[in-house]
Every structure is written in C-alpha cells, then in structure tokens.
Image (spheres, rainbow, N blue to C red):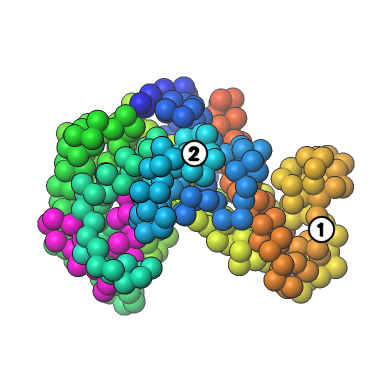
Amino acid sequence: MLKFELLATDPATTTPEGSYLGSHARRGRLTLNHGVVQTPIFMPVGTYGTVKGVMPRSLEEMGAQIILGNTFHLWMRPGTEVISQFGGLHDFEKWDKPILTDSGGFQVWSLGEMRKISEEGVKFSSPVNGDKLFLTPEISMQIQRALNSDIAMQFDECTPYLSVEPKTKGQVTTEREARDSMELSLRWAKRCQAEMDRLENPNALFGIVQGGMFEHLRDESLAGLEELDFPGIAVGGLSVGEPKEHMMRVLQHVGPKLPKHKPHYLMGVGTPEDLIAGVQNGIDMFDCVMPTRNARNGTLFSRFGDLKIRNARHKTDKQPLDETCTCHACAGTSGVSWANGGRDGFSRAYLHHLDRCGEMLGPMLASIHNLHYYLNLMQEVRDALDAGRFGAFVKQFHADRARGV
C-alpha cells in the first residue's frame, strides 16, 4: 500500500541578487503499510538490518520515520530463509515503522571486475565466501518480498560517472554506453514489475531514473518509467564520483520533471547542502551513509558547519558539538540545548578523548548526533514549508553553515 498526499508547495523565490532559492520544494505525507511518513524526509541507512551503532529506540527518539535495509547484504547474510521465519525485516530487527529496501543493483555495480552483466542479470562472486551467484530482476524482487519492506526498488544498473571534462581522471562512460545501461534498466524495470505482480506483493515498487550525465537520456528513462506507472520514482546514478556541478545540473534538470502526484526519492545523496538542493528541486526522500560513516571517522555535522573531532584543538574544549542541538550527545538526557540553558551534554573534549582512545561510545554518540542533525534539518524544512517561509529558511541555512564552528 502507498498513498501520497501533496500538502503544500513553495512558490518561486529569489534573493535581491537574483540567486535561486527554490520553486519546486514540496511538503507531503506518505502512507505505507507500517505507518505514515512526513516528507521531505531523510532515511537512515541500515545496511545489515541495523543502523550502525544506533539502537532502534534511539532512532525513534530522534525522529526517524523510515529506515533502509540493503537487499544485497541481507541476501548474503543472514539470508532470506532466516528473515522469512520472522515474517520479514521488521520483526527481525525490531523496527515497527516503514522500511525501504534497495534492489542490490548499486552493490553489484560496486563489485567492478568481480561481476558480469548480461540481459538476464548479473553473475558475480560473493564477497563473503566467494560463491558464484546470479542476481536477476526477478530474484531481487523475491528477496525484497521476503524482507517485506514497505517500499521495494527496481533492480537496475547504476550508470557509471561520465567524465565530460577531457582532462578529468576517472572512468569515462560514452553516450552509447550510458544509453545501453539506461535501456537495460528500463527492460529490467518491466521484469521487476511483472515479478512483483506475480508474487502479489502488497508493498510499493519504485522505478529508478538512470541515464548518467546526459539530460536527454534521463528524459527518456523517466518517460519509460511513467509508462509503467510505478507508484513512486527515484533518481539514481548521482553522487557516484561526478563533480558536484554535474550532479546539480542533472538534479535540476530531472527533479522538476518528476510526476507531481508521486513521491520522489534521490538515492544515496548526500551532504546537508545536497539535501536542501534536492528539496529545492522537488525531492521528497533522501538516504545516505554519510551521517554514520563520517561519524565513525570523526567528522560531525552541525548547524554551523562541519567539525573534525580528532583535531587537537578540541582536547580541552568544554563546548558541545552544536550549541543548538538537542540530541543525547549535545544535550544529554535533559534534551535542552546549550543555547537554551542546558548543560547536560558531552563536551567536545570528551568526544575527542573517546575518539583518540578508540572507545566505541565515541562513534556511537557521533552517529546519534549526525543522524539527529539530518533528521532535525528535515523537520525544519517541513516546518518552513508549512509556514510558507522556505526561501528565508534556505538563506539562513547557508548563512549558518558558512559561519563555521
């Protein structure tokens, strides 16, 4: 089941200098089998059936409405035969709110030389034990049906980054290769849809717009998916190594063209600035490993910029990570930010100490903080859209982030 309601839109707004602040931002409500999701929303990534270092209760307390599961990795371990005994991923990991599962396409793409793609599917060696495996659109749908996610994703081929600059290093994808990849994903989309119908899957299946850095291929991909009439549409193949300006070029081209009556999902993106740009271009749903991965590597996000907790300057710093934040790391059990008089949170000095000592509490608190920041950012976006002041919010967001910690 999927029901999407468009609650508000943001009118076009510009600064006196004429810079774009947003004209496609939208406020919505998504009803799924396991609950209601207010959009725009950020979805924490739970690759192996857990958001790394964060208890389900903590996710609920910080306002997580929907999380991700990874089809490829859960297929590897523990396997669908185990998860099926629990009726799906919800009971297995004790999360009673909505779950979105990816298709495994990105993980297969990331295997590089370890995989061989054909019309039928992808042959590859298991990164766990070396077993020879074969993943097809049909098998991906069967795995996701066993996981019983609220939203399943079509099996697609993630088109590699095209270097449009002659001197840019990295993998170069020609227009012909990008077209072949996009058209293969469209054919796989039809097979995914047919298999989900055969399985009588009660959950929603999203199609994925591909086409690399070529706007006209993105248009063709979207047109093909609209013919198939998926209940939701995702934009894939961005933030895969391309320069930021090219990612934004494609996003600004595709986002406003997505069907207005369906939810829009930007896959695997990204920084706080990327999320705001996505909202400005009509995106409703985001996911990214960045909040937890960066936390484990000592990078913390805050209203006033990014903070490297490993830097020696934090050794004796009594400040919290973010004086405006109400997460457990910054505000402790009281939930009162330092800006509002609270003094129960952990200092930067303490978090610096935990990181330097390799104590597991360090990345746990850092992950809680980063996820709280992302989720709270989306709450502030929703509040701004509800109040009709999204343009002013975006301007203040960029000013705050530029201030620095």
User: In front: mark 2 or mark 1?
Assistant: 2
**Where's the N terminus, which quadrant?**
top left
Asked if residue 364 lies left or right of residue 27, the reply is right
Q: Earlier in the sequence, mark 2 or mark 1?
A: 2
Q: Residue 22: x, y in percent?
A: 47, 38
Between 20 and 354, the one lying in front of the other is 354
Name the kind of residue labelled 2 in the image.
Answer: Asp
Seen at 34% across and 32% down, the residue is 203
**Where's the C terminus, which quadrant?**
bottom right
Disc 2 + disc 1, Cβ < 8 Å: no
Looking at the image, residue 386 lies above or below residue 319:
above
Residue 270 — which label?
none
Residue range highlighted in magenta: 103-122
Q: Which residue is mark 2?
A: 91
Looking at the image, residue 15 lies above or below residue 185:
above
Specify whether residue 307 is in view. Answer: no
Between 359 and 388, the one lying in front of the other is 359
Q: Which residue is mark 1?
A: 347
Q: Residue 363: x, y in percent?
A: 66, 61
**Which quadrant of the figure has residue 158?**
bottom left
